[in-house]
Structure formats: structure tokens, C-alpha cells
Amino acid sequence: MTPLDIGIASLALMVVLIIAGLHVAISLLLLSFAGVWLIRDDVGVALALMGQATNDSIASHEFGVVPLFVLMGLLVATADLGKDIFEVAHALLRRVRGGLGVATVAANAIFAAITGISIASAAVFTKVAVPEMLRFGFTPRFATGVVAGSSVLGMLIPPSLLMILYAFLSEQSVGAMFLAGVMPGILLAVAFSLAIVVMAWVFPGYVGGHMTAGPAPVLSVGAALGKVAPVILLIFVVLGGIYGGIVTATDAGALGALGALLLALAKRRLTPATFWKVLIETGRITVSVLFLIIAANLYSRMLTLSGLPQTIVEWMAGLGFGTAGFLTVFIAIVLFLGCIIDSASIMLIVLPLMLPVAQALGIDLVWFGVITVIAVEIGLLTPPFGISVYVVKSTLNDARITLWDIFAGTQPFTLIMFLALMLIIAFPRIALFFQ
């Protein structure tokens, strides 16, 4: 086999192994090691490259951003700030038709700005928002669809673990990626909210909702400020510090984690046992993310040795593919893979191949990162994999609401995400607003 044949075979085997259930990082490491061994015909070279890649991949203080933002997000979830945000949004929007759905989107958007994990958002608001929407007569399909659909904001609005992963894979600034996600995240949240209001007026039978289940909460200005002020302050410290150039993304993560810890202590939600669980979970997620980055780095080196990325660049150039043609192919591949594998796996498989092509075409890699994250996040809502849908289903634990009810409820949000993706492609300034 030629090196090019080995590179192509590794891609096919990668998809097969992941679908078969092997962890994506293990798949990457095994195929990278075997690929280098076959290309160089020397197991010693493969072992040496694995050792070097492991050291080079995470030998930087910048990787401290991962555990710090994960810790911040878990502390925020422990402090029940998601519930506080939802209560305030519900009180403000109680007289708007479909207002409880809009409140869920608004609360999810704010919660996303202090967690960065879509799964966490889906789990929190399934517990908080779905029972309340059902109590007010909203249909189960709509209620669960809103929660699952708006949970994707957690991976777009900074801080976002997918943005961090993309930044390291593409060698871009984490801070730049965070800022690039702000305007697209706001755009998507506004689009979701408008769509809910329109659906409530045009398709009232699908949305449901009434005011006979009991009074909506009424909060005084002081009570509302008391609930949201800590959250707004935390967002301001983290994103304001990065945008103002006062702190790096890693420093902002440290400040955010400290702020979240103080909030959790102030709300008396953090017992020693709970704090220990948060630390253990932080370590587990951090190790998982860093392991993925190491594996992806090794896999990228193996592909470079095979010559496959260069071949794809030359092939696309020969076909006359410009930026539009390349993006069409790229998005089609990502959307297809989103139906069968998870978000991180898609990025780890596709980006080592597509980033060299994007660079050859002169595409801004920060803008390309926003496009990538949105396209990948659509996969969180599409069957049969749709991990956000499965999280909602397992958290809800209600046999009356089927998995396919939730998938059906997410479809309007999937369509909106696709339209927002097209808008950001047409107007790159949306993503590059703060650059």
C-alpha cells in the first residue's frame, strides 16, 4: 500500500471503529500508530512520534483553560443559577404568547455564557423548564423540543468546550474563538425566540399553553436583580476581561472559576461532598478533552505523512473548487456525520483533512471555526444519534414522552440553525464582529 492508500484506509476504519463503539481517542491513537508504522515501515519511528506528539500537544499553560472553564460550569450548575435565571425570564415574559418557551431560550443563552456545555444545559432545563411548561399547558413535543433545541447554545456562546477544542486543533487563539461565538450565539437565541412567538400565534395547537394552571411568578425588581446580578457580573468578568485585553482566556477561566465558587458558597449549595464530586467530574472531563487533543495531534501528523491532506487540496484545486464549493462539501460531510457520531468525533475526523484546504483557499480560520461549530451542533438534534435529545429523554424519565416526540420537537430549531449557518456564511462579519 502507498502512504496515500494508508491515509484513506485510516479514515474508513475510523468511522467504522467509532460507530462500533470504540472511544474516539483510542481509535485515533491506534490508527495513527499503525499508519505511521506502515508508512515508515519502522515501529520505532511510530513509538517516537507518539511520544513526541503527546508531549508537544499539551505542553503549554494555555491548556489550563480547559479545567478552569469546566470547573466554572460545574460550580454554576451546582449553585442552581440556571433555575434562578429561568425564574426571572419567566416572570418578565409571563404575558407574551409562548413566553415560557422564550424564557427557556433566554435562560439557556445566559446559562451557556457561564457553562459552555450543551449537555449540562439540556439536563438542567429539562428539570427546570419542562415541568413548568407542561403545567401551563404547553405540548410535550414543544416543551422538550425547546429545551433540546436551545441547549445547543451552550457550545456556541462562550465559553465553549467545542470552541476550545477547535482552537487547539487549528492553532487559533482561544480568546479569539470565544469572541467570534458571541454574535452568532445572540443571533441564534433571537431567532429561536422569534420563531417560538410566531409558532405560538400561527400554530397554537402545536405549541399549546394557557394561563389556567396557576399564576406565573411575579418578582420585584430587587428580587430579580438579586437573582441575575451575580450571573451578569460573572459573564462580564470572563468575557469583558478577554474582550478588553485585560486577561488571557486562561486567566479569565481562573477568575470565572473563583467567582463561581464564591457564588456556590454564598448560596450554600456547596457541601464538602458536593465539592469533591465537582472536582472529580472536572478532572474526568479535562482528561477526556486533553486525551482527545493528544490523539488528534498524532492523527494529524500521520495524515500529513500520508500526503492525504495535500492530495485533497490539489484535487479540489483541479476541480476549480472555490470557497463556496469547498464549504458546500464540508458542511454536507459534517451534517451527514452528525447523524451517526458525536460532535467531538466529527471535528477530530474532519478537521485534520479540511483545515489545510481552508488555509490554501485563504479562509479566515476563526470564521471557519464558527461555521464548523454550528454545523457540528446541528448533529446534536438530528436522529438517530442526537445526544441532546437523549439527555433530555433520560433526564425527564417520562414514558409518555417518546424519543421521537423530542426529535420532532427539535426540527424547527434544526431548520433555524441551518438558516443561521447560511447567514453567517453569507455575512462573515457576524462572526468577526469583535475581531
Image (spheres, grey):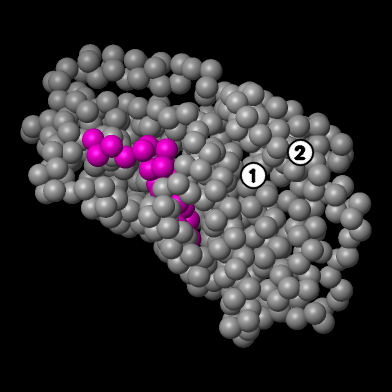
The residue labelled by disc 2 is 233
Whole-percent x, y for residue 223 in the image: 90, 53
Three-letter amino acid code of the residue under disc 1: Ala
In the rendered image, residue 371 lying in the magenta stretch gets the answer yes
Whole-percent x, y for residue 320 in the image: 13, 48
Q: Name which residue lies at 76% across and 67% down.
A: 93
Q: Name which residue lies at 62% across and 85% down.
A: 205
> Residues in magenta?
360-381
Pointer 2 and pointer 1: residues touching (CB < 8 Å)? no
Please identify the quarter of the rendering in which residue 187 is found.
bottom right
Comparing 86 with 323, the one in front is 323
In the rendered image, residue 378 lying in the magenta stretch gets the answer yes
Residue 369 visible in the picture: yes
The residue labelled by disc 1 is 113
Whole-percent x, y for residue 380 in the image: 48, 56
Q: Quadrant of the N terminus?
A: top left
